[in-house]
Image: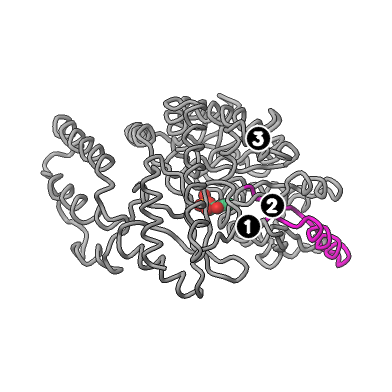
Amino acid sequence: MSDENLGDVPAAEFREQLHRLADWMADYRENIETRRVAPSGEPGTVTRALPQSAPETGESFDAIYRDIDELITPNVLHWGHPRFTSYFGATTTAPGIEADMVAAALNVNAMTWRTSPAATELETVVINWLREWMTLDQKFDGVVYDTASISSMHALAAAREEKASNARGLGVIGRADLKPMRVYVSDQAHSSIEKSAIALGIGEKNVQRVPTDNAFAMNVQALREFIARDLAQNLQPLAVVATVGTTSTASVDPVSAISQVCREHGIWLHIDAAYGGGLALLPENHWVTSGWNEADSFVVNPHKMLFVPFDFSVLYVRDIERLRRVFTLVPEYLRGDTLAAEKNYMDYGVPLGRRFRAIKAWMVWRTFGRKGIAARVREQMRLAQVFADLVKSDDRFELAAPVVMGVVCFRCNADDATNRKIVEQINASGRAYLNVTELRGRTVIRLGLGNILTAERHVREVWELVQEQC
Ligand code: PLP
């Protein structure tokens, strides 16, 4: 691009580039299956192929575009590939891609209503839609963040404020009036809770992991015993985090029984339904919502099950004023904004600047509707059962956990190293992508479904690859 022009890329050129990019994106989605799932390059492949120093003068779109096509794209792990069956699958969708393009063009900052009225209002709209779909009570209100890690950290900050009076004002360090605070999670809970404890001055060691039963769900009697022990030692039980859809097996903690314990002791109940929350959209899976309305806070990641592209996490808090009280802090230059409207999402967390994430959920959910989303989730759950049946039909393998959602944990009847090697070889082949996890000290292979492009033939192909390696 010429440096003589001090403006942006000229309109006609921009239009032409966008058309090329639109075709590129459509081709990428249409032909994604012909690609390797994981790249074959060693660490440093991309860096080595690029110049050592930053460009002093502008470069052409053609040169940049060529690198995207020939260097960047071949060196990403293709999460949208139908044989990418790792983590919780991927939630790329056409309306989601389009929404991200709209958001990029608008490039608004939804810190207050006035800084982007539509972004703020749409955020409230999709938060309300999702609350209704998940049958959460109206007393819950929400806020959109990037990830569940951040959502849970904010939930625990609100919990902390209630136990450590004026933690907001005085902090928690060096206060003789405070006892060490304890957070209880199952031994299957996500590591983000420890990260929250680190960030909030609670301390990683004050996250008590509670054993789980055969279905990898929290043992509530053990929870009671930990709380009793901590109270006897003059510690302060702060919160229990119940998981609905754990990371390794998608197991579900007994939320109702846990909520009873929380009520008895005045402990904050946070539900991590980052993955499993989406299941509530399927009427036949309504069981999953048991106890949800007893919670103080609840996180769900529509980027894990509900087809909203990464990143999109919603934190709901019962009486959200409890969260607002902790985080509202209006700098002078935004005071006028706060007089213009009541709902300013900057008041509900650490980030001031906020992307227009709501447009992704709004476009995706409008495109498919609740029924369409439920049907797609249901199909991915069915595929998990198909895969589980294949595992059961081959006596060289065993299922390692009950199959509750779109996740299948299984093992080849061999040692841990062999199981790890199976996954490494499949991933290195570029033909599929799985991950390993550990359950009760044993390495297991984990298949995670959820990609809208994954069909039964892909699942069967992955299974054939696994069989070849065992
Ligand atoms: N909670 C659960 C149950 C998860 O499985 C994960 C990640 O997979 C997280 C929280 C963290 O999610 P995020 O990457 O959005 O922070």
Residue pointed to by mark 2: 241
Mark 2, secondary structure of its residue:
strand
Residue that appears at 42% across and 52% down: 85
Q: Which residues are magenta?
A: 217-244
Answer whether labels 2 and 3 touch (C-beta < 8 Å). no
Counting from the top left corner in percent of width and height, residue 377 is at: 50, 38
Q: Quadrant of the C terminus?
A: bottom left
Residue pointed to by mark 1: 189
The CA span between labels 2 and 3 is: 20 Å
Image depth: mark 1 or mark 3 in front:
3
What amino acid is labelled 2 in the image? Val
For this rendering, which residue is in front, 380 or 438?
Answer: 380
The answer as to whether callout 2 falls within 8 Å of ligand 1 is no
Would you say 202 lies left or right of 375 here? right
Answer with mark 1 or mark 2, whichever residue precedes in sequence. Answer: 1
Counting from the top left corner in percent of width and height, residue 78 is at: 33, 52
Answer with mark 2 or mark 3, whichever residue precedes in sequence. Answer: 2
Q: Is residue 256 magenta?
A: no
For this rendering, which residue is in front, 42 or 40?
Answer: 40
Mark 1, secondary structure of its residue:
loop
**In the image, residue 32 above or below residue 123:** below
Residue pointed to by mark 3: 286
* Residue 467 visible in this rendered orientation of the protein: yes
Residue that appears at 61% across and 59% down: 199
